[in-house]
Amino acid sequence: MFHAKVEAMPDNPPDRVPNTGLWKVVIYDDQERFVRTDKDNISYSEAKKLSDKLNGWMNTKAKRAGQ
């Protein structure tokens, strides 16, 4: 099964205000192995919404496959 995480872009300054700067949505498999970056250079709120949507979609798809 896969899951999406919100991660800060590497070029964000370390002393920034929390949840500011640019973010990316990264998809991992069960062994925490990187699969792909879905979208990058987006705001935190946009990344969080996309991550939640992807996790809901991937979990629903996994549940259907396991039936």
Image (tube, helix red, strand yellow):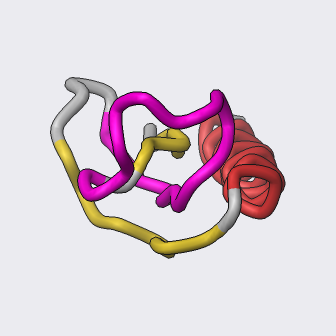
Corner quadrant of residue 50: bottom right
List x then y, in percent, for residue 24.
Answer: 48, 59
Q: Start and end of the magenta stretch?
A: 10-29
Q: Is residue 37 above or below residue 9?
A: below
Residue depicted at x 27% and y 58%: 11
In reply to whether residue 22 is colored magenta, the answer given is: yes
Nearer to us in this view, 27 or 10: 10
| Image position, residue 10 (x, y; %) | 25, 52
The residue at 52%/36% (across/down) is 16
- Residue furthest toward the front? 15
Q: Position of residue 36 (x, y in %)?
A: 28, 65
> Could you tell me which residue is drawn at 17 percent across and 38 percent down?
33
Relative horizontal placement of residue 30, taking residue 45 as reference (left or right): left
Viewer-side residue, 58 vs 7: 7
For the C terminus, the image quarter is: top right
The N terminus, quarter of image = top left
Q: Is residue 44 magenta?
A: no
Magenta span dominant secondary structure: loop
Residue 49 can be seen in this image: yes
Count the marks: how many?
0
> Which residue occupies the foreground of this view, 33 or 41?
41
Q: Does residue 64 appear in this view? A: no
